[in-house]
Amino acid sequence: MAHTVIPPTSARLRARISGALYVLCIGCGLFAEMVVRAKLVVYSDAAVTAHNIAAAPGLYRAGFFADVSAMALGVLSSVLLYTLLKAVSRGLALTVLVLDVISNAVSISGSILLFAPLIILQGDGYLSALTAPQLSSLALLSIKLYESVYAISLGLFSGSCLLTGYLIFRSTFLPKAIGVVLALAGTCYLLNTFVVLMPKGFADYLFPWIFLPILVGEGTLALWLLIAGVNSAKWDAIAGAQTI
């Protein structure tokens, strides 16, 4: 029986759309972390953090929505990437997709902790029993708890990066070097999770250096997908062989 093979141009188009979504995901995440929280949140000073957020609630809210958008964009990009990588191994590609969905679901569920300071610092009547310093401490605690939840989600995502790197390395339609740097990014994500959950101060030895391989690995994959897509002839040969 003859089987229909998805046109290679479709594979390249899906790769580029996945890359565009990935670039937007990275951009939103960097905006939330490097522009918003880096400016407003002082992790060692609850009072200053509370003052900064109260003075710029719109900016803090924009950072929150940028984070949520990054998570949603990451899932959409992963779905499209799955349709490409399943040509290498359907089982492993599906595992990657499941890990991506779960890790982003954990982050989105925990994002209520990130939004909480906007509610806490409004000082509504039901919070009148708490003093201003207590409200400030509670707001900063909420942000720190979110960071712990996010670290756990990145631990799950590290498995996705490692498996994706392996699939890319095995594939013939994407450069093997991208698979290597993405696997390194996954290793750094996993290390980051353990570091964040370790005693205070240990993380200072690794930040921000631990994120450089992550930015290189994910950024390289996203830009390659966006600009070059995949080698459509080689992808079609693999996908076609699976449909015979």
Image (tube, rainbow, N blue to C red):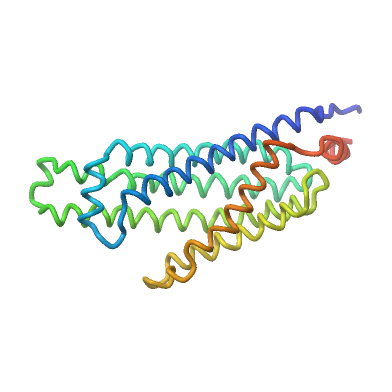
Q: Where is residue 59 in the image (x, y as percent from the top left)?
A: 33, 38
Q: Where is residue 95 in the image (x, y as percent from the top left)?
A: 65, 49
Q: Tell me: residue 159, above or below residue 2.
A: below
Find residue 7 and report its image quarter: top right
Give the left or right position of residue 67, taking residue 142 as reference: right
Q: Position of residue 110 (x, y in %)?
A: 39, 48
- Number of callouts in the render? 0
Q: Residue at x 48, y 40 (%)?
A: 28
Out of 25 and 162, give the one closest to the viewer: 25
Give the left or right position of residue 152, taking residue 11 as reference: left
Out of 234 and 93, give the one closest to the viewer: 234
Q: Residue at x 81, y 43 (%)?
A: 173
Give the left or right position of residue 2, taking residue 108 as reference: right
Q: Position of residue 147 (x, y in %)?
A: 39, 56
Q: Which residue is drawn at 79% across and 53% down?
A: 170
The image quadrant where one finds the N terminus is top right
Q: Which residue is drawn at 66% across and 36% down?
A: 80
Out of 197 and 182, give the one closest to the viewer: 182
Q: Tell me: residue 48, above or below residue 21.
A: below
Q: Tell me: residue 5, above or below residue 207.
A: above
The image quadrant where one finds the C terminus is top right
Out of 102 and 111, give the one closest to the viewer: 111
Find residue 61 and report its image quarter: top left
